[in-house]
Image: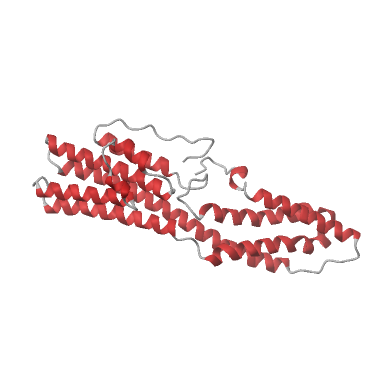
């Protein structure tokens, strides 16, 4: 995620520059053809076209931003439930050597869980972070299709073991189970966003309409702008191309691009809070790299 007071044009619209160069040369060709031929450009209703296109692009950008913001809300909920989970586990389990050991394992398993979830959403291997947190002990969760969900299942079995040993009662177990359900619900929401793309119409039609508008733009402006058509038409077209690119940048909030959510920073914050709760050193907070927080 780009941080700072002002957006960086190079980072925000980098992919639009190639289209802008092509648009400029097209505008230049239309202008030259207009002056060397007897052809006169037709009067195109560019205002109507531009207004309709702006509405379409507005719907698309709003839809993409809603996905991005919902992803941030879900990860904010995960931060809160992670702190609550560590707090109740440490409070409910008995203050004995075995009780403290189980509480520590549950908290460390949750740290591994959020890192595994981050890796899964980014289509990366979760094994390195899980082994870094839990050590080299066998991790059967890695053999599952969804290792993060396997971590939740294993933690739930350990909670049930604590109930059978009489360390916690059923009311306390229900409270912990409710937190695990909240984690599962948040994970399900993240997976829904990740695995459900925008409808084909939202992805295809705005691109077709924007390209068509950019092609027609110099034809409709050359009578008015004359020799300034390449500059004026390219600038106007770039505005629409930039808005189109914004939608592409925000549509997958769990990717690993400069515009995506800073999942590494969020999971590092969770790890720091939970490590301090069980007396382990906290990792340093993640700092922006070249103005980007990952």
State the residue in front, 276 or 37: 37
Q: Residue at x 39, y 52 (%)?
A: 73
State the residue in front, 190 or 144: 144
User: In the image, is 254 to the left or to the right of 39?
Assistant: left
Residue 214 visible, this orientation: yes
Residue 269 visible, this orientation: no
Could you say where residue 143 lies in the image, as x and y percent from the top left? 31, 49
User: In the image, is 3 to the left or to the right of 27?
Assistant: left
**Quarter location, residue 272:** top left
Could you say where residue 225 lies in the image, as x and y percent from the top left? 81, 57
**Quarter location, residue 263:** top left
Looking at the image, the residue that sits furthest to the left is: 166
The total of numbered circles placed on residues is 0
Could you say where residue 3 lies in the image, as x and y percent from the top left? 51, 41
Q: Residue at x 54, y 58 (%)?
A: 61
User: Which colour style is shown?
Assistant: secondary structure
Could you say where residue 164 lies in the image, as x and y percent from the top left? 10, 49
Q: Residue at x 31, y 51 (%)?
A: 144
User: In the image, is 46 to the left or to the right of 98?
Assistant: right
Q: Residue at x 52, y 47 (%)?
A: 259
Image height of 194 relative to 294, above or below? below
């Amino acid at each position: 995620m780009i941080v700072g007071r002002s957006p960086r044009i190079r980072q925000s619209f980098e992919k639009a520059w190639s289209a802008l160069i092509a648009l400029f040369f097209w505008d230049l060709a239309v202008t030259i053809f207009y002056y060397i031929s007897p052809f006169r450009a037709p009067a195109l209703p560019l205002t109507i076209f531009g207004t309709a296109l702006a509405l379409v692009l507005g719907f698309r950008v709003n839809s993409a931003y809603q996905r991005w913001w919902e992803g941030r809300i879900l990860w904010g909920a995960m931060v809160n439930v992670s702190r609550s989970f560590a707090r109740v586990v440490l409070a409910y389990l008995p203050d004995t050597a075995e009780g403290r050991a189980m509480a520590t394992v549950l908290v460390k398993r949750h740290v591994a869980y959020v890192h595994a979830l981050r890796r899964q959403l980014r289509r990366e291997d979760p094994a390195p972070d899980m082994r870094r947190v839990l050590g080299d002990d066998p991790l059967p969760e890695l053999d599952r299709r969804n290792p993060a969900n396997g971590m939740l299942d294993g933690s739930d079995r350990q909670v049930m073991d604590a109930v059978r040993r009489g360390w916690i009662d059923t009311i306390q177990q229900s409270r912990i189970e409710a937190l695990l359900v909240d984690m599962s619900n948040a994970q399900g929401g993240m997976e829904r966003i990740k695995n459900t793309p925008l409808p084909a119409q939202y992805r295809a039609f705005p691109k077709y309409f924007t390209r068509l508008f950019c092609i027609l733009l110099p034809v409709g402006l050359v009578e008015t702008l004359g020799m300034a058509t390449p500059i004026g038409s390219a600038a106007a077209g770039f505005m629409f191309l930039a808005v189109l690119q914004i939608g592409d940048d925000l549509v997958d909030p769990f990717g690993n691009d400069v515009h995506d959510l800073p999942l590494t920073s969020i999971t590092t914050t969770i790890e720091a809070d939970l490590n301090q709760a069980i007396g382990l050193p906290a990792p340093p907070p993640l700092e922006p790299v070249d103005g980007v927080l990952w």
